[in-house]
Amino acid sequence: MTKNVNITPLHDRVIVKPAAAEEKTAGGIIIPDTAKEKPQRGTVVAAGPGKKDEPMTVKSGDTILYGKYAGTEVNFDGQNLIIMRESDILAVI
């Protein structure tokens, strides 16, 4: 469970908690940490107010899909988070 984050993103930025990487394959093979793919799904933890003429379309709690190399990874208060622009979000699930 994600605890509250005391970060407020600016403009069109969002803070995302990435989903956990898969531990096993469908056949039951355990994948080591070095071979795991980065997840491309996560939950929006916080969203900025948007740009002057473009309000935000995502909100806190939305589950999203994003590009493989989108955003900047940060470790804040013991949590791994990604800060990205709203335009890096591909879809809301």
Image (cartoon, rainbow, N blue to C red):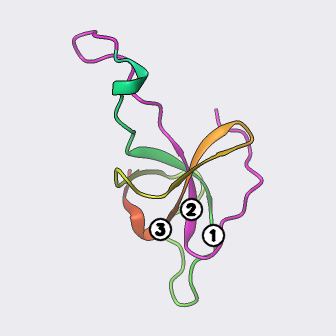
Tag 3–tag 2 contact (CB < 8 Å): yes
Tag 1–tag 3 contact (CB < 8 Å): no
Work out whether mark 2 precedes mark 1 in sequence or the reverse, and give the earlier one: 2
The stretch in magenta equals 1-30
Residue 18 picture location, percent across and down: 50, 42
Q: Give the spatial CA distance, label 3 vs label 2.
A: 6 Å
Magenta segment main secondary structure: loop
Residue 64 picture location, percent across and down: 43, 52
Q: Quadrant of the N terminus?
A: top right
Q: Considering only vertical position in the picture, is 2 above or below 16?
A: above
Q: Considering only vertical position in the picture, is 1 above or below 87?
A: above
Work out whether mark 1 precedes mark 3 in sequence or the reverse, and give the earlier one: 1
Side of 68 where 78 appears, left or right: right
The residue to which callout 2 is attached is 14
Choose between 19 and 81: the one closer to the eye: 81
The residue to which callout 3 is attached is 86
The residue to which callout 1 is attached is 48
Tag 2–tag 1 contact (CB < 8 Å): yes
Residue 23 picture location, percent across and down: 39, 19
Q: Give the spatial CA distance, label 1 vs label 3.
A: 9 Å
Q: Is residue 23 magenta?
A: yes
Task: Identify the secondary structure beneath mark 2.
Answer: strand
Task: Identify the secondary structure beneath mark 3.
Answer: helix
Query: Residue 25 is drawn in which quadrant?
Result: top left
Q: Amino acid at mark 1?
A: Gly
